[in-house]
Amino acid sequence: MPSVTLYDKEFTLYLEEEKIQNAIAKMAKELTEEYAGKDVVFVGVLNGCFRFISDLMKYIDFNAEINFIKLSSYRGTESSGKISDLMSLNTDLQNKHVVILEDIVDTGHTLDYLMEILKEKNAASLKVASLLYKPDAFIGKTKPDYTAFDIPNLFVVGYGLDYDGLGRNLNDIYQIKS
C-alpha cells in the first residue's frame, strides 16, 4: 500500500483521488439542485479547503460568489481547542444563501465559531458542506449539511489537509499509520 512520510510521521493511502473527485461531483450536483437561481456565496475555510473548493466549483452549474476566511485550531496532529481568526470575511452576506466549505469537520469547534460569526451577517440561509466529517470526534453544535466522506477519528493529510504545513499538495488522502 502506498505511503508517504511527512516530518516524523508515516501515512498510508486512505482515499484515492478518483474517489474524491466522484464524491465532489455528486456533492456539486446536490448543491446545484438546491441553489440554482439563488444568490449564493461559497465561503471557503483556508488553508485546507483550497483544493476542495477549486474542484467543487468545476462542477457547480450556477453563478455564485466565492470568498474565504482563514481560521486555525491545529498544532501538529491535535486540535488545540483554541480558534485563531487569521483572515476575516470581507463580503456582504445580507439576504444571500451562504454555503461554508470545509475540508474537514472533526470536533466541530471551528465550525461552531464560524457559524456564530456568520449568523450576525443576516444571511438568507447558512449551510455547511465538508469534504470529510469525523462523527466519532464531533462534539460541536453544527453538523455538516453535505458531506463527501464520513471517516474514522484518524489524522489525515493530503488533498489540502496538512501536517504542520506539509502534505497539502498530495492528490490522494492518507491516514496516519498507527
Image (spheres, helix red, strand yellow):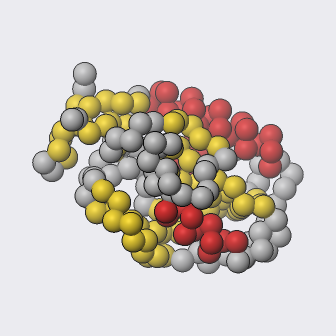
- Foreground residue among 113 and 1: 113
Asked whether, in this view, residue 126 is left or right of residue 39, the answer is left
Asked whether, in this view, residue 78 is left or right of residue 112, the answer is left
Residue at the top extreme of this rendering:
1
Quarter location, residue 64: bottom right
Against 12, residue 53 (above or below) is below
- Foreground residue among 5 and 72: 72
- Indicate the quadrant containing the C terminus: top left, top right, bottom left or bottom right: top left
- Residue at x 77% of width, y 69% of height: 123
- Residue at x 61% of width, y 49% of height: 144
Residue 51 shows in this picture = no
**Residue 76: % across, % down:** 25, 58
- Foreground residue among 88 and 106: 106
**Residue 66: % across, % down:** 64, 61
- Residue at x 54% of width, y 58% of height: 140
**Residue 28: % across, % down:** 67, 40
Quarter location, residue 59: top right
**Residue 129: % across, % down:** 62, 49
- Residue at x 51% of width, y 36% of height: 150
What is the tally of numbered marks visible in this picture? 0
